[in-house]
Amino acid sequence: MYWADELASAVDGPQVVNDSKTPSGTVHVGSLRGPVVLDVITRALRDRGVPTTLLYGVDDMDPMDAQALLTPDAVEREMGRPLSQVPDQVGDCHASYARHHAQTFIDIFDGLGIRPDRYYWMSDIYPTGQMDPFIRTALDRAEVVRDLYRRVSKVERPAGWLPISAVCPTCGKVGTTLARDWDGATVAFECLPEYVTWASGCGTTGRIAPFGGAAKLPWNLEWAAQWSLFGVTIEPCGKDLATAGGSRDRSDAIAREVFDREPPRNLAYEFLNIGGRKMSTSKGRGPAAPEIVEVVPPEQLRLLFLRPRPNQAIEFDPDGTDAIPRVFDEFDRLAAAAAGQEVKGELPADADRIFRYALLDPAADLAAEAARYRPAFAHLALLAQIPGVDVAARVAAEKGSALSVEERRILVERLAAVGGWLDSYAPERARIEIRRDALPPEAAALGEDQRVWLGAFARAAETAPPPSGDAWQALIFEVATAAALPAGRAFGALYMAFLGRTNGPRAGWLLASLEPGFVVERLRAAAGWRDHADGASGGTGAHDTAEAAG
Ligand SMILES: [Zn+2]
């Protein structure tokens, strides 16, 4: 059974699915795995008729600790303040640093069809007093918290340490304060210049009532308090938090021993790994989520994350590879299988469920979606590079009928993806320049065996022009086998004849992107190249020399 359906079949009663995130800065594309996992679980539950609420929280009371993302003059003032209090550093577009980065992230997963029933912002929750009962309990049970940190995570807190961070009334920092002496109404606090390395407190001391937004719980307690406050029953988390003795274990223990509640069901998920090369976000390539969503449309991006089981790491290295085209090909294979067509290669178990969950609209008609005409990514990548091609007309001709509104939308989406891929990620071999006017001069290097083969191939292609890239590919192999020419030399001859180089994109699809008449003409010219050059004085044309070569 598909993993999310498995989980959905194991629960009883209404469910609350939750995740929350600290809006600390730019979002790596791998951060989208969590929201996709969350969404698929929610859809699986609802498919089984389980009443389900999906929540998404923004932990924007967490202190600012990323110096690199601040302007130099802001570092001293802003480091250590709650993210909700730090001004927007990117522009004046949002009310705070937290709102800017959280909204960017929320917009991205909204585009992926992930629509929580409710978003909550911790900077809104604290002032309402909803966290106060949990703050009081945590302070009353501070000894239990200290003991539990020691037992679960081997973290030693000093005697008198309290699980609360006051917001300094003088400098507004929350990351720099230390609290002690809970008297049932107030705590003593100090804002320390050297409490943490990344921020400097102002030295203020005093007593405050730690309620109504005047203080925040440390992260592990805040997490467990969210579970109680919202009645969370399922919360997946990244494997970095799910290690033994790690953050999740700590919060689970806090839920049980401090807030007297069973923690939600966990589903730990692995990372998405980007290949080692050119990983820097500053280059505007690779890992940043906003850039990836420019190139990989929502349904393909959903597929990338939901196809593997959560406990499997995802290797995704789009730079200079076919990783992006492969996601499209896999999507198309699943669509074809869902439409009842025969597909190449092994299908994943539950292929129909995977296809359904990849679709943007949870209520989509599976059969109708599966039946839509989707031109192959590699084919479009070639068509897009050949001057003068009316791609929409060409695709409609290949389909054999007019494209539906939905199919035109898919085509536009794919052409945008192709453009982004060619601009930023595609390997050199995928970039082509067809020299239409004349045979590339490099074709002089073709061997005699290759010329003979090109002539035979031209005749076969003229007799029965292959209708698709796959059919062209099959014909290349067929004629090469008949001529006893190694496939590598056959493909090399084609690349030389059309591109003037020794490699290129899949040759069958390259030929399929060109008009059959031009293909045959070029094959003949290449087959007879030497004769043509020798015969310049004799006036033989390409067509004649091809016949001579045959
Ligand atoms: Zn201070």
Image (cartoon, helix red, strand yellow):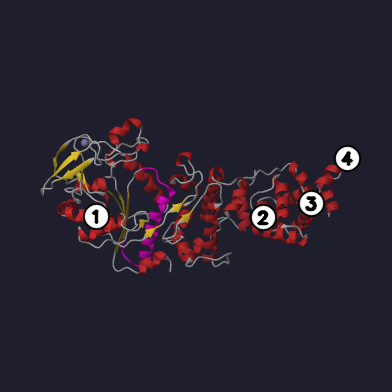
The answer to whether residue 390 of the structure is visible from this angle is: no
Which label is found at residue 451?
3
- According to the picture, the residue beneath numbered tag 4 turns out to be 537
First in sequence: mark 2 or mark 4?
2
In which quadrant is the C terminus drawn? bottom right
- Separation of disc 1 and disc 3 at Cα? 77 Å
Instruction: Please provide the residue range marked out in magenta.
Output: 25-52
Which circle's residue, 1 or 4, is located before the other in the chain?
1
Label 4: which secondary element: loop
Please determine whether, in this image, residue 100 is positioned above or below residue 467: above
Choose mark 4 or mark 3, whichever is in front. Answer: 3
Instruction: Tell me what residue is drawn at x 60 percent, y 58 percent.
Output: 401
Q: Which residue is mark 1?
A: 150
Instruction: From the image, tell me which residue sits under label 2.
Output: 508
Q: Specify the amino acid type for callout 2.
A: Gly
The type of residue carrying mark 1 is Arg
**Contact (Cβ within 8 Å) of mark 1 with mark 2:** no
- Of the residues shown, which amino acid type is indicated by label 3? Arg
